[in-house]
Image: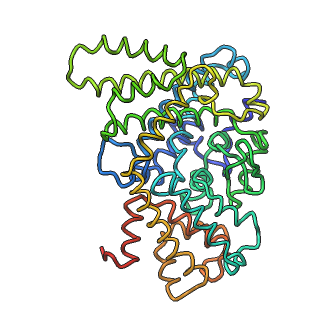
């Protein structure tokens, strides 16, 4: 694998940025700025991480989660670029690597959830299940003749939607979106596969690119030379994401009062293996001695535990990345870096705790059901009306933001609803609804149902 090639700084659309005076950034640093200033990133401040429609400012949203993931990913990148063996492997000077890999990892981590719909990961399931039901109807199935296009909706995934957001849905009078470098886009692709390339095992189980972005995917594959191999940096992005959601969901649950620090401590000790128990016991012993005041003792303890766990998992991710780099570059590594852990089992035990004590809370499940009703309700309004051109079609079409309609019109060359191909009408509806914030989706649903007029 040629690291100079997979870190390609070329773009789909040639840019004149290099001619700007006093801009000393490289192309990857420019990518980071484009993502930071994008409207889609701003909207993540009101999108669910775990707790839908939460009013508690201490609890994570998609945006705060993504900021933390970017920080951890950058740390992984900096540590990696200081490893002599890795520097020698890439044949790229250390000073260049340090201005490429950490910023690419920051960029893709910052936007790794940018395509997620409202109401968290459950929103993804709701969209996929809606279209599973929609396309079981004979009349509906006739709307799309291409089975791969149907799978784009029945296998809906926020990662594929995010790729579309980054590559097309930032409108600047063309269909190039943020026009990020091939290197950044490739590292973003957690699942670099189309619906016709899915399999039952490994990373191919999930859809990563819609048919509407097929040509761009082919261009990325050709430019980077990766073909169907996952970009190595995607493994580090994935690790940073998992590290943050496991540790911060644990802390959020504590802040919501679901359990005490003592209950966390007991669960980890009681359920961990011997190696994990030894490390945790050592940490807990030192932590207890350091706390000489009862003021905020539990709060301080949970924060210190989070810091300890993040460091342990960062070390594990980096160690596994370097020890498996030959297999990763060959495209034969199919595990998550922090879950490939036969010794300590930190990720497994944290995942089990959060599943049992956070995600199954009635508060969360009740609000997820609200989100399900909202998302399905919105699709029930838009899909039949626009697909079958009923009396509400034009009014609902005009409700969709002009920028999104412009993209579909540019993609298809059609500027009238009646002439737009069915696949792109559905693509437009999904673009609109998946891009909504939680509160906007709830408000629009209530207005369309006549529950409120504001």
Q: Nearer the viewer, residue 234 or 297?
A: 297
Q: In this rendering, is residue 142 above or below 156?
A: below
- Residue 255 position, x and y percent, is 31, 37
Q: In this rendering, is residue 303 above or below 293?
A: below
> Residue visible at 42% across and 58% down?
437
Quadrant of residue 174 in the image?
bottom right
Q: In this rendering, is residue 217 above or below 87?
A: below
- Residue 78 position, x and y percent, is 55, 23
- Residue 404 position, x and y percent, is 54, 66
Residue 153 appears left or right of 361: right
Q: Nearer the viewer, residue 242 or 26?
A: 242
Q: Tell me the quarter of the image containing the N terminus.
A: top right
Residue 330 appears left or right of 295: right
Quadrant of residue 57 in the image?
top left
Query: Farthest residue in the bottom direction?
Result: 391
> Residue visible at 21% across and 20% down?
294
């Amino acid at each position: 694998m040629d690291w100079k090639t997979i870190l390609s700084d070329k773009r789909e659309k040639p840019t004149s940025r290099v001619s700007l005076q006093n801009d000393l950034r490289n192309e990857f640093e420019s990518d980071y700025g484009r993502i930071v200033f994008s409207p889609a990133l701003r909207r993540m401040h009101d999108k669910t991480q775990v707790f839908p429609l939460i009013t508690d400012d201490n609890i994570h949203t998609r945006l705060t989660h993504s900021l933390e993931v970017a920080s951890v990913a950058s740390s992984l990148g900096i540590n990696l670029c200081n490893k002599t063996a890795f520097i020698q492997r890439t044949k790229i000077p250390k000073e260049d690597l340090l201005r490429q890999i950490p910023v690419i990892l920051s960029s893709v981590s910052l936007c790794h959830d940018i395509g997620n719909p409202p109401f968290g990961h459950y929103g993804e399931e709701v969209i996929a299940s809606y279209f599973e039901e929609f396309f079981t109807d004979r009349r509906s199935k006739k709307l799309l003749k291409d089975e791969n296009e149907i799978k784009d909706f029945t296998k809906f995934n926020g990662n594929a939607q995010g790729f579309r957001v980054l590559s097309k849905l930032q409108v600047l009078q063309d269909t190039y979106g943020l026009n990020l470098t091939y290197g950044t886009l490739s590292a973003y692709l957690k699942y670099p596969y189309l619906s016709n390339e899915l399999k039952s095992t490994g990373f191919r189980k999930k859809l990563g690119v819609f048919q509407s972005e097929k040509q761009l995917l082919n261009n990325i594959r050709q430019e980077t030379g990766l073909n169907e191999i996952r970009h190595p940096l995607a493994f580090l992005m994935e690790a940073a994401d998992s590290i943050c959601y496991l540790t911060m969901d644990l802390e959020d649950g504590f802040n919501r009062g679901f359990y005490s620090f003592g209950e966390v401590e007991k669960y980890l000790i009681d359920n961990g293996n011997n190696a994990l128990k030894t490390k945790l016991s050592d940490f807990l012993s030192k932590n207890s001695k350091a706390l000489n005041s009862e003021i905020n003792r539990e709060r301080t303890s949970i924060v210190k535990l989070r810091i300890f766990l993040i460091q342990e998992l960062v070390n594990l991710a980096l160690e596994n990345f370097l020890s498996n780099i030959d297999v990763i570059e060959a495209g034969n590594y199919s595990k998550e870096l922090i879950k490939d852990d036969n010794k300590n089992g930190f990720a497994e035990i944290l995942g089990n705790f959060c599943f049992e004590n956070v995600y199954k809370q009635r508060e969360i499940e009740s609000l997820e059901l609200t989100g399900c009703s909202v998302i399905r309700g919105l699709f029930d309004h838009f899909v039949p009306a626009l697909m079958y051109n009923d009396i509400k079609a034009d009014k609902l079409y005009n409700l969709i933001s002009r920028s999104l309609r412009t993209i579909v019109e540019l993609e298809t060359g059609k500027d009238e609803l009646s002439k737009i191909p069915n696949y792109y009408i559905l693509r437009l509806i999904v673009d609109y609804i998946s891009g909504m914030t939680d509160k906007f989706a709830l408000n629009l649903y209530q207005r369309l149902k006549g529950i409120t007029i504001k």
